Amino acid sequence: MIDFTSRLFGLGSKEAALKLAEDFSVSLDSKGHGPPRKTIIKRKISEEVRYRQAEQKCFRVLCDYLRLLERWKEEYAPKQPEDDWHPLFVEALHRQPYIEYLLDILLSDSIEERASVVAEYGKEVKKIEQRISEFTASHPAGCDERSRGHSAGTERPRCAGEPFCHR
């Protein structure tokens, strides 16, 4: 192909190869093989940006869920020892230590351990995000029935989970 281009345009072999590379948008590094260094650097930066975004999203979702669990633990706690435990109270008791553990890793450990959490728990974080969305959709303004059922003459108490209250 280079010989044909060389004869067709009256160029030397090197010039013909460069013309072909330019015409077909093929980049060459100084050795003539592989992608140019700039492309490799851009690809690496792009991967780092995607990882950072995934880590930040994971952290944000876990923080939102932790705040929601803390709120459930307080709002749905049994008032009397003989009262039944509300499912949201039970979920808060079970999940809070685990979510705190994952957040501790994302806050303090090495990049390898943080990347491991993001990779291993990515699907779970998506499920948690969906769980939060479902809860906020079924509980307008994020407030539970106890907070919404007040008479017109009294002021509505503020929710403990303020990020979920938009009133």
Image (cartoon, helix red, strand yellow):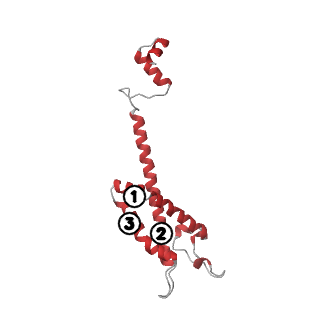
> Residue 13, percent across and down?
41, 16
Q: Residues within 10 Å of mark 1 (few under 14, many from 20)?
A: some
Pick whichever of labels 3 and 1 is earlier in the sequence. 3
Residue 97 appears in which quarter of the rendering?
bottom left
What separation in Å lies between label 3 and label 1 (alpha carbons)? 11 Å
Mark 3, residue position: 101
> Residue 43, percent across and down?
43, 40
What separation in Å lies between label 1 and label 2 (alpha carbons)? 20 Å
Mark 2, residue position: 67
Pick whichever of labels 1 and 2 is earlier in the sequence. 2
Mark 1, residue position: 117
Q: Is there a contact, CB below 8 Å, between mark 1 and mark 2?
A: no
Q: Looking at the picture, which amino acid does disc 3 mark?
A: Tyr
Left or right: residue 151 versus residue 91 is right
The mark found on residue 94 in the picture is: none
**Label 3 residue SS:** helix
Residue drawn at (48%, 66%), measured in percent from left and top? 65
Q: Does the image show residue 167?
A: no
Q: Residue furthest left?
A: 110
Q: Looking at the picture, which amino acid does disc 1 mark?
A: Val
Residue 135 appears in which quarter of the rendering?
bottom right
Say if 57 sits above or below 20 in the image. below
Pick whichever of labels 2 and 3 is earlier in the sequence. 2
Residue 33 appears in which quarter of the rendering?
top left
What separation in Å lies between label 2 and label 3 (alpha carbons)? 14 Å
| Total count of labels | 3
Residue drawn at (33%, 59%), measured in percent from left and top? 109
